[in-house]
Image (tube, rainbow, N blue to C red):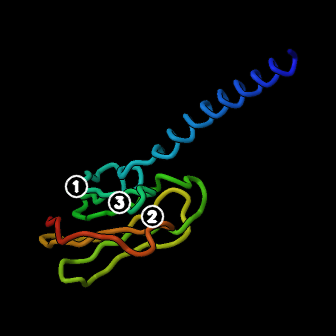
Amino acid sequence: MFRRKSARAVALAVTTGSMLLAVPAAAGATTTGYTPQTACGSSYATVHSFDLPGGTSTVYLTYSRSTGKNCVATIKNTRIGTPTLTGAYLTFGDGSGRQEELANFSYYATAYLYAPGQCIYFGGRDYNSGDWWGTGPGWCS
């Protein structure tokens, strides 16, 4: 009888522990505490965004009317706080003037481009994407 109760108690503890551990991990996987505005600056408004393959990071394009600059931020959704390959880029619509940041970052990478009256390409990459992913020219200031 003791063994049966012990087995049930262990099974309940393991099941309960698994459920408790799963909830914070799932919540933490998509919540970094960072927004495009904390990465780029408070004057930057989000224009467009897309997820990198697997949803491991999200790429945000922002624009500031006060500075006339575009900023792209690749914000990590997984491996938050651990330095892993993370990058962001912007170019003019003709592909020139590339601005990029690529390194092992813990939270996000950013790049800025002053492109008044021009359309731009933008994108990002991370440890899971394998290469740069981008879009454009989809934003014209």
Count the labels in the image.
3
Mark 2 or mark 3, whichever is nearer to me:
3
> What residue is pinned by disc 2?
109
**Percent position of residue 75, x then y:** 43, 56
Asked whether 107 or 16 is in front, the reply is 16
> What residue is pinned by disc 3?
59
Residue 59, picture quadrant: bottom left
Q: Are marks 2 and 1 in contact (CB under 8 Å)?
A: no
> What residue is pinned by disc 1?
47
Q: Secondary structure at mark 1?
A: strand
Q: Earlier in the sequence, mark 3 or mark 1?
A: 1
**Percent position of residue 42, x then y:** 34, 49
**Residue type at tag 1:** Val
Q: How far apart are the alpha carbons under marks 2 and 3?
A: 9 Å
Q: Secondary structure at mark 3?
A: strand
**Residue type at tag 2:** Ala
